[in-house]
Structures are given as C-alpha cells and as structure tokens.
Image: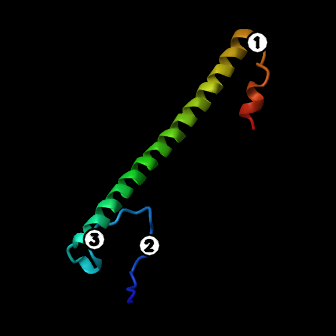
Amino acid sequence: MTFTLRSEPYDPYVPRTGGAPGGAPPTAGNSKTAAIQQQIDDTVGIMRENITKVAERGERLDQLQDKTGESYVLAVGVEPPGLWATSRL
C-alpha cells in the first residue's frame, strides 16, 4: 500500500473535485465516490447556509426583544419584570 503526501492538509469542509489522485479521469469506482462526495459537499453547503440564517434570525430576535422592552418602558413607565434580566445574561 502506497501513500502519497499532499501539499495541503485534508479539510473535510472544503469541497474537492472528483477524480483519481494526480488529475487522472475518474474510474467507475471513483465516479460513485465522486457522486457521494458531491452530495456530501452539497449537504454541507446547505447546512452552512442554515447556520448563517439561524444566527441572523437570533440577532433579529434580540433586536426585537430590545425594542419591545423599550416600548413597554415608554408606554407604562416601568421595566417589565424579567425582560431585562434574561437579556442581560
């Protein structure tokens, strides 16, 4: 069994191109592997987009909570119990 050293370290989160090492065209076995790798790369891309969307949604929820608390203070003149305590944690 022979191992080849690559010039760059392996990163499972960086999509790779299909094919055999050294740029040779893919064989029948490698084409299945390349198809599966492409599905994995697509799934990872979708997961990254979802994580970004969740983070953005969380920021918007925090802003909305701040605005709600400020509106409550202006309307009633007192801080709502527990609202600021949870957001300050």
Question: Badges 3 and 2: C-beta atoms under 8 Å apart?
Answer: no
Vertical order, 9 against 3 (above or below): above
What residue sits 42% from the left and 53% below the top? Answer: 44
Amino acid type at circle 2 is: Tyr
Distance from disc 1 to disc 2, alpha carbons, whole Å, reads 59 Å
Residue at image mark 3: 30
Instruction: Find the residue positioned furthest to the top.
Output: 75
> Mark 3 or 1 closer to N-term?
3
Question: What residue would you read off at disc 1?
Answer: 77
Q: Measuring from the top left, give residue 84's x and y in whole percent.
A: 75, 28
Query: How far apart are labels 3 and 1 at the CA level?
Result: 69 Å
Tag 1–tag 2 contact (CB < 8 Å) = no
In percent of width and height, residue 7 lies at: 39, 81
x then y, percent, for residue 28: 22, 70
Position above or below: 74 against 64? above
Label 1: few (<14), some (14–19) or many (≥20) C-alpha neighbours in 10 Å? few
Query: Of the residues shown, which amino acid type is indicated by label 1?
Result: Gly
Q: Residue furthest bottom?
A: 2
Q: Is residue 35 left or right of residue 43?
A: left
Nearer to us of marks 1 and 2 is: 2
Tell me the residue that label 2 is attached to: 10
For the residues marked 3 and 2, what is the alpha-carbon distance in whole angstroms? 18 Å
Q: Earlier in the sequence, mark 1 or mark 2?
A: 2
Q: Secondary structure at mark 3?
A: helix
Residue 77 position, x and y percent, is 76, 12
